[in-house]
Amino acid sequence: MLSLPVWFSDAFGHLEKQDADALKHLWETEPVLREAAARLDTLNPALHPSTHCPCCGSEHYVRNSRDWEYRCLDCLRQSSPATGTPFADGNPPLFNRGDK
């Protein structure tokens, strides 16, 4: 039996027991799901925060007023850690899984 990832209960804890059990079974039997989750983890900006501006590449990249917003002091553009990733169009909770 494979162990579930730490984010699994946060993401699917709202499901009824029967649905949760079916999803756990799917997770254990379908390697493509585990591979897709691992691939998304490599792209998840909350797990790998950037230290430079995604627009101009400057290292003068500081946190803005919100935890998930940054501002470049050179090009003055505002961005989030998700800029340029598949998570870019979502809200912060989409890329913040809480297991940094």
Image (cartoon, helix red, strand yellow):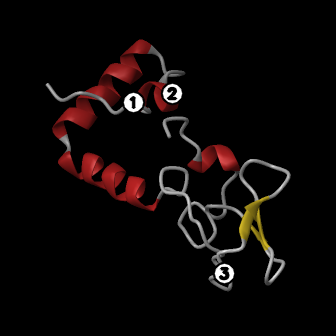
Question: Looking at the image, which is closer to me, 32 or 95?
Answer: 95
- Residue on which disc 3 sits: 58
Q: Amino acid at mark 3?
A: Ser
Rendering quarter of residue 83: bottom right
The residue positioned farthest toward the left in the image shown: 1
Question: Looking at the image, which is closer to me, 37 or 51?
Answer: 51
| Image coordinates for residue 27, horizontal then vertical, percent | 27, 36
Foreground: disc 2 or disc 3: 3
Q: Amino acid at mark 1?
A: Val
Q: Amino acid at mark 2?
A: Asp
The residue positioned farthest toward the front in the image shown: 60
Chain-order first, disc 2 or disc 3: 2
Q: Is residue 23 above or below residue 70?
A: above
Circle 1 crowding by C-alpha within 10 Å: few under 14, some 14–19, many from 20: few
Mark 3: secondary structure = loop
Mark 2–mark 3 distance (CA, rounded to whole Å): 35 Å
Foreground: disc 1 or disc 3: 3
Mark 1: secondary structure = loop
Q: Tag on residue 6?
A: 1
Q: Residue at x 79, y 82 (%)?
A: 74
Q: Is residue 17 above or below residue 98?
A: above
Mark 2: secondary structure = helix
Q: Is residue 42 left or right of residue 11?
A: left
Q: Is residue 71 left or right of residue 43?
A: right
Chain-order first, disc 1 or disc 3: 1
- Residue on which disc 2 sits: 10
| Image coordinates for residue 72, horizontal then vertical, percent | 77, 74
| Image coordinates for residue 63, horizontal then vertical, percent | 76, 57
Q: Quadrant of the N terminus?
A: top left
